[in-house]
Amino acid sequence: MAEDTRQDKRASFSAITEHNTNGMARTSAVASGKSGASKKLVIKNFKDRPKLAENYTEDTWLKLRDAVGAIQNSTSIKYNLEELYQAVENLCSYKVSPTLYKQLRQVCEDHVQLTESLDNLSFLKRMNRCWQDHCRQTVRFDGLMLCICCRDTGLELFRTHIVSDSAVQKRTVDGILEQIELERNGETVDRSLLRSLLGMLSDLQVYKDSFEERFLTETNRLYAAEGQRLMQERDVPEYLHHVARRLEEENDRIVSYLDQSTQKPLISCVEKQLLGEHMTAILQKGLSTLLDENRVTELALLYQLFSKVKGGLLTLLQFWRDYIKSFGGEIVCTPEKDKDMVQELLDFKDKMDNVAQSCFTRNEGFINAMKEAFETFINKRPNKPAELIAKYVDSKLRAGNKEATEEELERILDKIMIIFRFIHGKDVFEAFYKKDLAKRLLVGKSASVDAEKSMLSKLKHECGAAFTSKLEGMFKDMELSKDIMIQFKQYMQNQSEPSNIELTVNILTMGYWPSYTPMEVHLPPEVRFIFESFFLCFDLNCTDNDHFILQGKKELQVSLFQTLVLLMFNEGEEFSVEEIRAATGIEEGELRRTLQSLACGKARVLNKNPRGKDVEDGDRFNFNNDFKHKLFRIKINQIQMKETVEEQVSTTERVFQDRQYQIDAAVVRIMKMRKTLSHNLLVSELYNQLKFPVKPGDLKKRIESLIDRDYMERDKETPNQYHYVA
């Protein structure tokens, strides 16, 4: 049937063929209106289309598939493009195009599915390659069309069709965050890849919205958990070094691949989570240990890190102040440590000074806090630190101190003055210092006159001339005594019968020197005659030292008491302790120390029977005729009695008595000037004028005493107001 239809159609046409000059057939068809008059269209030289070679379609598709893959992977195509083009045309002309299209679509779908199945790192590399290709193409477009800005258009198109796709954007950012997390955990990542991709986000103006916000959120979460965990697991030095390393790593990331705009929020995030949230815990856990062990490296790191956090230095300063108060208070308020208190205070001050200078960059706030803390704890125990500082100075200025050169001694005195500056009760120091200075001057135990005067100058500079006036008077007395002794020697040389005794006398001004208990002794006639013939004409108090000539061979330099004992042996061979005491009148304790110095020391001028280091009742003494010494002039050292508790209490009580006099004088002085004053204003004025600590109750007692003695009176209507009584 179909064949009949085709034949009918061919029968309805006729063709008139004419040949043109180029050999092609030109036909003319004339339709006849009469039935049965059909004509044929004849194409001259027409041949049937040749058939495709066997396996041509399959072979061609294999070549095309390779070419498509090369295009997708941006590699070179190994086939001739014209040949491929002709092959596609051939397939289409043989109506194979539907099959070809289906195969091509499948390849593209496989490629897309392959991209989606890539791991994050491979995806990032694929995205980066796409971005780099796009950038290179845009640059080439710019070169071709200089008059048209292709770069902005290219960025807009890439942002619109690639990055703005939510799935693509999420996967890109997820991959970048994953790589950063891996690096934070210690693994090596491709930083150039991250730098390129983050640069892409920045160029496309989606860096902040698409990446930075998520990045900071993840960073905050990471370091919050890390800070909590490591504060439990590590000690403070380890934790501080970890924080410093983390900050260094994050700064390095900013330099390497993050945008500079991320620096401030990123570093703030790390500092807040690793430091800001744990400041108190860090200091409570480790500051005392760092300071106790003098860990200057970690202390400097601690200061450096805390200076980056808001409120960090203020918190550190408070803990620093509290530590000094606690540690120093333990030194001062522990009586068992009194022996070494001053040296420990000096060492502690040196240690804290070094921390403040080398670790805390000489921060003025920390230095002032240290001074405040020292002043607080050193006055928690009234009077004792002042007393012990005075005794410490005495130990350094006393002869026989071989610990330091003059330069080192000067440095020690400077350090002592720093501690002295914190003391409120400086009058207690003055009382004990004056007592020890008197011993050094009178017994000749001062190591250096220059050092003594240097210390005096420091005290004067610190406390004023009034504080050192009596101390300076003591030195003037010693200089005056030297001048008088020169006159005495000249006097003795002019005598017709020179004495074998060289007498040294010190002339002292009573108001300058500490008060001593009067002691009456029995002077030998020769000593009494010398003293009365010259020194009584000065009508002054005196103490004396004698030079005793031993058989014209040795010269003994001895004290007055030693002289009285030795001269007895010109009258007899042997004496008991009781006999010597009765003859000389020396007080029992002083006599025992005197006999001990003569019979039990290095230069034993007397023999003691029985032998021993201590002098007991019943001991007998005789002159040592076998005494030998390599020196001609020999100084017999006196046995210095250690200050007893009673003497310390007595000195302290005298200070308190002097304070009462000063309070009375200050009250009278203020009331005389003001005439009428309320109690509170009077107390306020007293605190401003008095230079020693005093309790309100003590002031009230002194005011009541002055009222009783009619120096002032209460107002009859207002009892809390006082009037001066002329």
Image: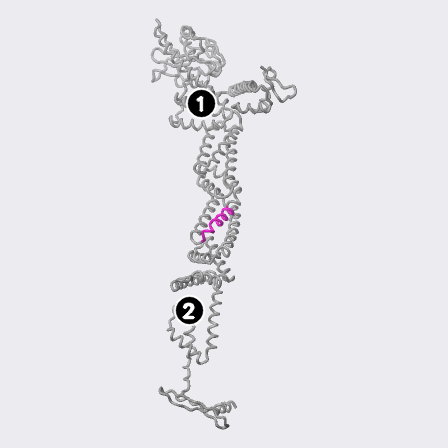
Q: Identify the residue shown where x is 43% and y is 68%.
A: 72
Which amino acid type corresponds to the residue marked 1 in the rendered image?
A: Lys
Coloration mode: one colour
Which amino acid type corresponds to the residue marked 2 in the rendered image?
A: Ile
Q: Which residue is mark 1?
A: 460
**Main SS class of the magenta portion in the image:** helix
Q: Which residue in the rendered view is the most extreme toward the bottom? A: 36
Decide which of tag 1 and tag 2 comes sooner along the chain.
2
Q: Secondary structure at mark 2?
A: helix
> In what quadrant of the picture does the C terminus appear?
top right
Q: Identify the residue shown where x is 43% and y is 7%.
A: 536
Q: Is residue 464 above or below residue 560?
A: below
Q: Nearer the viewer, residue 604 or 99?
A: 99
Mark 2: few/some/many CA within 10 Å (<14, 14-19, 20+): few
Residue 612: tell me if it is visible.
no
Q: Secondary structure at mark 1?
A: helix
Q: Nearer the viewer, residue 649 or 90?
A: 90
Reply yes or no: does residue 195 show up in magenta: no
CA–CA distance between discs 1 and 2?
96 Å
Q: Which residues are magenta?
A: 258-274
Residue 197, quarter of the rendered image: bottom left
Q: Which residue is mark 2?
A: 71
Q: Is residue 297 above or below residue 5?
A: above
Q: Which residue in the rendered view is the most extreme toward the top? A: 496
Q: Position of residue 698 (x, y in %)?
A: 58, 22
Residue 696, quarter of the rendered image: top right
Q: Position of residue 437 (x, y in %)?
A: 44, 20
Q: Is residue 410 above or below residue 522?
A: below
Mark 1: few/some/many CA within 10 Å (<14, 14-19, 20+): some
Residue 37: tell me if it is visible.
yes
